[in-house]
Amino acid sequence: MNVDRAARWAEVLANFGVIVTLVVLIIQVQDNTRSLRGQAILDRAAVFTEPFISSESLLPTTLAKLTAVDGAESVVAAYMDRYDLTYEEGAAWTRHKLATWTSLEAEYAVLGPSTGLRERIRILFPFPNERIWLTGGGLDWLSTAEFRDYVLDVYAEWESDHPTQE
């Protein structure tokens, strides 16, 4: 009888161990999926930014020629207007901003919203060129509507704390 009871307890403990193992695996798969999503966001940004960083790239000059016919993207045009930049300079700066904001988006994708992320985003808002990114269409370049909405919420909060900013 003690052997039967011990066998039943061993079976219960084994089943419990299987369930715990499955829960741990599910959590690990979810963490891995978030990490992969974050890396995909960074890889996407690299495709847009690397050609503008390379000194051998003809992409900025080519885009300037296209822009002469089609017009600049709204956020690039906003930088050009405010800072008297050439198209090449505006496009390179826009891609730099894309890389900056994409790294924040990747953090959001992996870790979700956090106090630290909120502060890293808020610290950018005092700079007019960051607000141009936000209001001039730069957010449209990001991957997910969820992150765009998060940034806009943080920005609205920041604006309410700083009503006299430019």
Image (tube, rainbow, N blue to C red):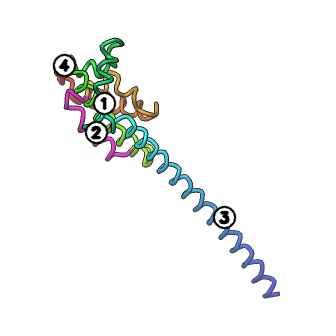
Whether the residues at callouts 3 and 2 have beta carbons within 8 Å, the answer is no
Residue 114 as seen in the image, left or right of residue 37: left
Q: Which residue is mark 3?
A: 19
- In the rendering, at what x and y percent does residue 36 appear? 49, 49
What residue is drawn where x is 31% and y is 26%? 134
Q: Which residue is mark 4?
A: 82
Q: Residues within 10 Å of mark 4 (few under 14, many from 20)?
A: few
Residue 50 as seen in the image, left or right of residue 30: left
What residue is drawn where x is 81% and y is 83%? 4
Q: Which residue is mark 2?
A: 54
Q: Amino acid at mark 1?
A: Leu
Q: Which residues are drawn in magenta?
A: 114-130
Q: Which residue is mark 1?
A: 58
State the separation of the CA atoms marked 3 and 1: 57 Å
Q: Nearer the viewer, mark 3 or mark 2?
A: 2
Q: Is residue 54 above or below residue 77?
A: below
